[in-house]
Amino acid sequence: MRKVKLGVIVGLSLALVLVVMQNTGPIQGRFLWFSAEVPAILLLVLAVAGGFILGLLVANFYLRDRKPVPHREYTERTYRG
């Protein structure tokens, strides 16, 4: 299962890099009342970085409340999650 997850992560990362690298032309970017002509690659990189940071924050929020398992209570099921 671990190899499948790694394969999916690598595949999605490669697809993301390809999309970003193929979209370098200028586009009209708008945010609220701001508007500017910027390279599409910049907006894509900012969107990806924002999504990554948001994902880390959400994961941290949900994992923060988990109580650690004492060492003597580790079982095979504990390691599998």
Image (spheres, rainbow, N blue to C red):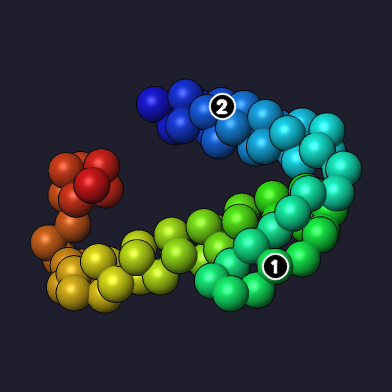
Picture coordinates of residue 76, whole percent (x, y):
20, 43
- Residue 1 or 38: which is nearer the viewer? 38
Residue 51 visible? The answer is yes
Crowd class of label 1 (few under 14; some 14 to 19; many from 20; radius 10 Å): few
Which residue occupies 45% across, 65% down? 54
Looking at this rendering, what residue extends furthest in the right direction? 25
Q: Which residue is mark 2?
A: 7
Alpha carbon distance from label 2 to label 1: 38 Å
Q: Is residue 9 above or below residue 52?
A: above
Q: Secondary structure at mark 1?
A: strand
Crowd class of label 2 (few under 14; some 14 to 19; many from 20; radius 10 Å): few
- Residue 81 or 42: which is nearer the viewer? 42
- Residue 54 or 72: which is nearer the viewer? 54
Q: Secondary structure at mark 2?
A: helix
Q: Is residue 45 above or below residue 18?
A: below
Marks 2, 1: nearer the viewer: 1
Residue 49 visible? The answer is no
- Residue 9 or 39: which is nearer the viewer? 39
Picture coordinates of residue 73, whole percent (x, y):
12, 61
25 horizontally vs 7: left or right: right
Which residue occupies 29% across, 72% down? 61
Residue type at mark 1 is Ser
Which residue occupies 74% across, 54% down? 28
Residue type at mark 2 is Gly
Which residue occupies 55% across, 35% down? 9
Picture coordinates of residue 49, whole percent (x, y):
62, 61
Q: Which residue is mark 1?
A: 35
Quick check: marks 2 and 1 in contact, CB under 8 Å?
A: no
State which tag comes first along the sequence, 2 or 1: 2
Residue 10 appears in which quarter of the rendering? top right
